[in-house]
Image (cartoon, rainbow, N blue to C red):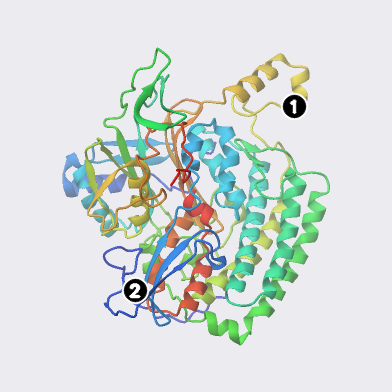
Amino acid sequence: MATTEPRIWPKQKVLQPTPSELYPSSDNPDLLEINLGPNHPSTHGVLRVVTTLDGEIVVGLKCEVGYVHTGIEKNIEQKTYWKAIPYVPRMDYLSFFSGETAFCMATEKALELEVPRRAEWIRVLFQELARLHSHLVFLGTGSVDLGGIALLFYCFRARDEVLDLFEMVCGARMHPRYCQVGGVAEDLPKGFEAICRKFIPFMRNQLDQYDELIAANPIWLGRTKGVGVLSPEFAMQMGLTGPNLRASGVPYDLRSANGGYGAYRELDYTPVVEQGGDVHARFRIRIEEMRASVDLIEKVLDGMPGGPIIADDRKVVLPPRHELHTSMESLIHHFKLVTEGFTVPAGEVYAPIESARGEFGFHLIADGGPKPWRVRLRSPSLVLLQSLAALCEGVYLADLIAILASIDPVLGDVDR
Amino acid sequence: MQVNSPTWGEPDNGAGDRLEAEFGAGVIIRRVEHRGELTLDIPVDRLLDVCRFLRDHEGYDLLSDVTAVDYLGYQGEVAGYWGGGSDGRDINHYSHSGKGAVPEAAGPKRFAVSTTLCKVMTVTDGNHRRLRVRVWLDEDESISTLISVYPSADFHEREAFDLMGITFEGHPNLRRILMPDDWGGHPQRKDYPIGGEPVQFSDEV
């Protein structure tokens, strides 16, 4: 895994005057300005990268975002809390379950609602599956950007297995809306554990295959080693979190920092760290993180506690369906919750979680009513896109594609 | 009971005390502790100094988030809304069904800009603390940009400018980021009309 030799990091300076944009310094009349995107497959969505080229060297770069801005924050202000949950996974559509969990956790924190132990464990299971899903898409599409198409088909086959597990538990393959304020919406179906256990050795075998495909491939190594090196201090200044930060050797992971959140507190997760800080390290760390995720899934299945899957607070949580036919009180609660929603005490909370691409946080400002006063989504992709210009100073255009693929932005998450 | 937030660490009241020792008692207008999260309200003109002190002396090396909030009509009974008709929205037209008046701002001032900071690499005791610094602004006020202290504030501040209309003094590239460049108004303000949405790019040429 990680090498222990000390590393000399490049001295990276924050770009002046704008940290996120690189301006060409010479008035060379032969400079060529091109648009990468917004409809370019290598930008992984609708991102427009305005690039100035001197021959094949990148001398100027700025990112234009906002093409898929749908106003999710403003929309959530018009919805009651639990009607807002389906909006959230549509942002980071690759790591969809993280969004749901983060929003529910922020609401639970504002409510001071205790989540049953089993629900926390189920959430961890699906957060790790969503992380696997996201990293698989990253690895597949990233390798296409570097010219190797085989890995895409391998990764998407495994991705399908992950989506099958989501389909089994909630009926939808993506955007499950399975997380619920107070717990999860339904218990795991019969037979889920057996299928999930079969998935574990399959996934491990797959990961070994991916490794074999790229680990000793000279073209792959030539394209990735030493390209786009990111020093830890610079990563900190540019606000990078998640795998990109850990690929530069900083062992910061919200799943283990301060003991972790949710059921990660009981699982003793140790963050995966790589030392290179280049494109190669950022690809490696995703593969190693997928291994760690599979280990976590196995650990969760082994230790899955019994008990309720959702909190028993009738002012917040829907009553069980069968009670509606016999209990007047349950019917009233159900009616009130569906029409009015529940109220959340006034105040400001910020609940971050570790999604597949870093710190994903919900800043929730409640006014005591049934709708959030303001929701702010701290999306990791928006932040990490800022470092692109500094990383691409003086590289070849083809390396720009590799660097962009390796930092793994999701444009739905950038624009929200 | 899971009240304390593990992702926030212990409330860092020590940092608040040291801030007061450095800048005088007036630098913290009030401390708010809610669900284990500490918020320091500070005067608008001290934001840059306070953040620089927190970065250099307290070890808050990661800017986690910048959030702008519009408190117009907060907790009030808003019966009306800023609406639009079939021909588009009218930012200056307030619709109400007879009982609604234009709501007043409920906070000390109308807008709040909260900056959430986090300790990542400087942690020695295994406690990654977080701290929120908040300033209050009126519509005609502006705050200084944090780019010189935390370069990653760039996109966050552009977004706050774009969607909430907060002006950041000294920002080298303060232009819209999510909305089109020629957009009118700031959509996340509470007095921005909902509905009456004109269809974009459908004008006859």
Of residues B175 and A304, the one drawn nearer to the viewer in this rendering: B175
Q: Is residue B161 placed above or below B77 in the rendered structure?
A: below
Q: Which residue is the extreme one toward the front?
A: B205
Q: Is residue A241 placed above or below B18 in the rendered structure?
A: below
- Report which residue position mark 1 lands on: A321
Q: Are marks 1 and 2 in contact (CB under 8 Å)?
A: no
At a point 33% along the width and 76% down the height, the residue shown is: A11
> Few, some or many C-alpha atoms within 10 Å of disc 2 (few <14, some 14-19, many ≥20)?
some
Q: Tell me residue A297's x, y (percent).
A: 69, 57
At a point 65% along the width and 29% down the height, the residue shown is: A312
Of residues A286 and B183, the one drawn nearer to the viewer in this rendering: B183
Q: Tell me residue B44's x, y (percent).
A: 22, 42
Which quarter of the rendering shows the N terminus of chain A? bottom right
- Report which residue position mark 2 lands on: A12
Of residues A40 and A352, the one drawn nearer to the viewer in this rendering: A40
Which of disc 2 and disc 1 is earlier in sequence? 2
> Few, some or many C-alpha atoms within 10 Å of disc 1 (few <14, some 14-19, many ≥20)?
few
What label sits on residue A41 in the rendered view?
none
- Residue type marked 2: Gln
Q: Which chain letter matches label 1?
A: A
Q: Tell me residue A200's x, y (percent).
A: 75, 62
| The image quarter in which residue A83 lies | top right
Q: Secondary structure at mark 1?
A: helix
Q: Tell me residue A192's x, y (percent).
A: 79, 49
At a point 31% along the width and 38% down the height, the residue shown is: B112
Establish whether labels 1 and 2 are both on one chain. yes
Q: Which chain letter matches label 2?
A: A
Q: CA distance from mark 1 to mark 2?
A: 58 Å
- Residue type marked 1: Arg
Residue B136 left/right relative to A373: left
